[in-house]
Amino acid sequence: MVRRASSSLNPWWAIGVILLIVAAIFGGWALYKNVSDPFRTLTPLDVSAYLDNANSLRGNVYKVTGTVETQLAWAPLKGRLYSVAADDRNDVLPLLIPASFNSMNIQRGQRYFFKIQVGEKGILLVQDIRKV
């Protein structure tokens, strides 16, 4: 009687499949991390250059990712002034959020992506805002 060869799972195949699964998970995470930023095409604000001379950046559009610290002021027609801690540094920036965003519930400790424009006298005016 002829014996059949037993087919067992080669350990190299199992290791290869596990490595492919780990690579797919890591690749998906990296893709999500990069694609989740809605303002990824904008230049990040150079905070040190802004703090040194805000007028040199006037008129330019940047992105800032940060955590809301406190609401500094509010005017119904102008908007709200918030202090925001920038993620890439330990500096706090004043951001003026126009009245068109008054319907948003912005609370202390929340993280946001901000599309900002450096306005007259170095005021950081928010053009768009998205929650992280």
Image (cartoon, rainbow, N blue to C red):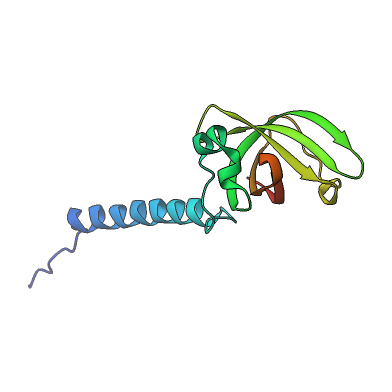
* Residue at 69% from the left image edge and 40% from the top image edge: 121
**Residue 123 visible in the shown view:** no
* Residue at 34% from the left image edge and 54% from the top image edge: 23
Of residues 123 and 128, the one nearer the viewer is 123
Expressed as whole percent of the image width and height from the top left, the position of residue 47 reads 53, 37
Left or right, 69 with respect to 89, comes to right
Expressed as whole percent of the image width and height from the top left, the position of residue 3 reads 9, 68
Expressed as whole percent of the image width and height from the top left, the position of residue 91 reads 56, 28
Location of the N terminus by quadrant is bottom left
Of residues 22 and 27, the one nearer the viewer is 27
Of residues 12 and 3, the one nearer the viewer is 12
* Residue at 58% from the left image edge and 50% from the top image edge: 62
Of residues 49 and 64, the one nearer the viewer is 49
Expressed as whole percent of the image width and height from the top left, the position of residue 112 reads 65, 42
Left or right, 117 with respect to 52, comes to right
Q: How many marks?
A: 0
Location of the C terminus by quadrant is top right
Question: Relative to 64, is 35 above or below?
Answer: below
* Residue at 77% from the left image edge and 43% from the top image edge: 97
Q: Residue furthest right?
A: 76
Q: Residue furthest left?
A: 1
Based on the displayed image, in which of its 4 quarters is residue 56 positioned? Answer: top right
Q: Residue furthest bottom?
A: 2
Based on the displayed image, in which of its 4 quarters is residue 21 positioned? Answer: bottom left
**Residue 22 visible in the shown view:** yes
